[in-house]
Image (cartoon, helix red, strand yellow):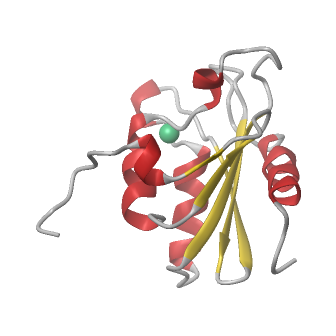
Amino acid sequence: MSNPTPQELLALAAQSARRAYAPYSHFRVGAAVLAEGEIFLGVNVENDAYSLALCAERAALAAAIVAGKRQISAIAIACIDAPPDSDLRGRMPCGACRQWLSELAPQAKIYLLGSEQEFSADQLLPWAFRWKR
Ligand SMILES: [Zn+2]
């Protein structure tokens, strides 16, 4: 699947969310990153020490980076435990993930399960921190 539709990418994100490790929040999230024709999945991974939790978006982005893929064209994010009628903000990437998206996926299209809207990293974090760039 080298050129998936947003719906296909969201379906992969939702499938991967079932493997999330979220025993504390019970809020499972999956992410699917499309980079150079390949798909990389991530899930949220929580920890007894709450602040050490890793978000699905960053897990998927890191998987792409590990594989040597830097051209990230899309990311789909699925919060499968969010109530279907919940506010969109309850399914948005957190601030840390927005910073990662801004640096690693500045051109990527960002899709959220349950929303028809398409976002960009600039929209989500217009004044992202930059180190001498
Ligand atoms: Zn996050």
Please name the residue shown 78% across and 50% down the image: 13
Which residue appears at 54% of the width and 62% of the height? 61
Corner quadrant of residue 64: bottom right
| Placement of 47 over or under 24, stated as above or below | below
Q: Is residue 44 above or below residue 100?
A: above
**Quadrant assignment, res 14:** top right
Judge from the rendering whether residue 34 lies leftward or rightward of residue 93; answer left or right.
right
Q: In this view, does 21 lie to the left or right of 1?
A: left
Q: As displayed, is residue 79 above or below residue 12?
A: above
Q: Which residue lies furthest to the left in this view?
A: 132
* Residue 97 visible in the shown view: no
Q: Residue 44, image x and y in percent?
A: 62, 41
Q: Considering the image in quadrants, where does the N terminus appear?
A: bottom right
User: Which residue is nearer to you in this view: 77 or 52?
Assistant: 77
Which one is in front, 120 or 53? 120
| Residue 128 position within the rendered picture, expressed as x and y whole percent measured from the top left | 28, 49
Residue 69 visible? The answer is: yes
The quadrant of the rendering that contains the C terminus is bottom left
Q: Position of residue 10 (x, y in %)?
A: 81, 50
Residue 92 sits in which quadrant? top right
**Residue 22: x percent and y percent?**
67, 30
Q: How many marks?
A: 0
Report the residue at 84% width, 55% height from top. 12
